Image (cartoon, grey):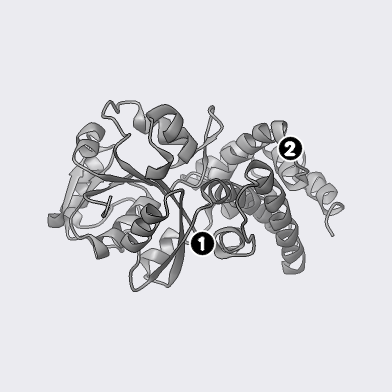
Amino acid sequence: MNSLGKIAVMGGGSWATAIAKIISDTHPKFNWYMRRPEQIEELQALGHNPSYLTSIQFDVKNIIFGSDINEVVENSDTLIFATPSPYLKQHLQKLNTPLKNKMILSAIKGIVPDENLIVSDYFCKFYDVPKANIVAIGGPCHAEEVALERLSYLTFAGANEKHAQLAADAFSTRFIKSTTTPDVVGLEYASVLKNVYAIVSGICHGLKYGDNFQSIFICNAIEEMERFVHAVSSTIERKIHTSAYLGDLLVTAYSRFSRNRIFGTMIGKGYSVKTAQLEMEMIAEGYYGTKCIKEINNEYQVDMPILDAVYSILYERKSAVLAIRKLTETFK
């Protein structure tokens, strides 16, 4: 494959909208799948997504919209999936068009629930997509800053170096800098864990822990991330302090745009999980990632006190005050 061919953005949320903005700069004509036909109609009429990142204006004449996933997949060579991980299976339920000859770019920073699989493994196992045809997209990058055209960096992880570079080139604009790595597994698990740790950062913020403590928390979180990622993928040498790992953790744990941090802050202030989810009206993927990583770690038995603490708060209804206080005793 010498090019990405016809590109399709798969999803209608904020991250999908940000990706569509980037792609519209480098590939003005592309396909865009959204599940709800009414969302497509509103976008075509208004020139922007009515629900997310409304400041982004699109030349809708150059975009072929579709709510039929089979039709969009059939007419595309490269599919950029940007849906929340808990909804991926639901989006693919109606798909009967083969994916094995497609390029899959995953901008999904989560694990497929029930299967406990990172997205690349899910497409390999259930849709026969070769590993060489899958590229995972890592941060650090918030959709809201893409909308504002603030300089951002993305990392493209692929087993096939050429395909990873093609993807990186497709996203390289005046406000996006792109790099590549062969560390697909490491990047995907790190993308899940940074959401988990951002929830804890938010909980600590809600409990009135200050910036001094947050710095120590991040130091311990990146060490925990490194232990786990090394346990699940020890064959690739990685530098955990680089942007795809530490950088993505920092922006997700600190940024006011981070929905995982916002969710955690609400928990720290005393909201129940259900109430926080209802008030946010957006998916905090770290909530689902916490349970998935906890179950996966039953096999690896990595020492993960931060994960254990947030799991006890979110799923066992333990006191956030007591769980975080106990967690601080493990920090150094």
**Residue 34 appearing in the image:** yes
Query: What percent of the width, then of the height, locates residue 328?
Result: 83, 54
Viewer-proximal residue among 151 and 177: 177
List the single residue furthest toward the right.
329
Query: What percent of the width, then of the height, locates residue 275?
Result: 57, 40
- Crowding around mark 2 (Cα neighbors within 10 Å: few <14, some 14 to 19, many 20+) is some
Looking at the rendered structure, the number of numbered marks drawn on it comes to 2
Instruction: Please state which of the two labelled residues, at mark 2 or mark 1, is closer to the viewer.
Output: 1
Q: SS at mark 2?
A: helix
In terms of sequence position, does the residue under pointer 2 or pointer 1 come before the other? 1
Q: What residue type is labelled 1?
A: Pro
Q: What residue type is labelled 2?
A: Ser
Q: SS at mark 1?
A: loop
Q: In this view, does 52 lie to the left or right of 224?
A: left
Viewer-proximal residue among 132 and 107: 132
- Where is the C terminus found, in terms of image quarters? bottom right
In the picture of the structure, the residue carrying the numbered disc 1 is 140
**Residue 18 appearing in the image:** no
Query: What percent of the width, then of the height, locates residue 141?
Result: 47, 61
Q: Are marks 2 and 1 in contact (CB under 8 Å)?
A: no
Which quarter of the figure has residue 293? top right
**Residue 312 — which label?**
2
Q: Is residue 307 left or right of residue 1?
A: right
Which quarter of the figure has residue 3? bottom left
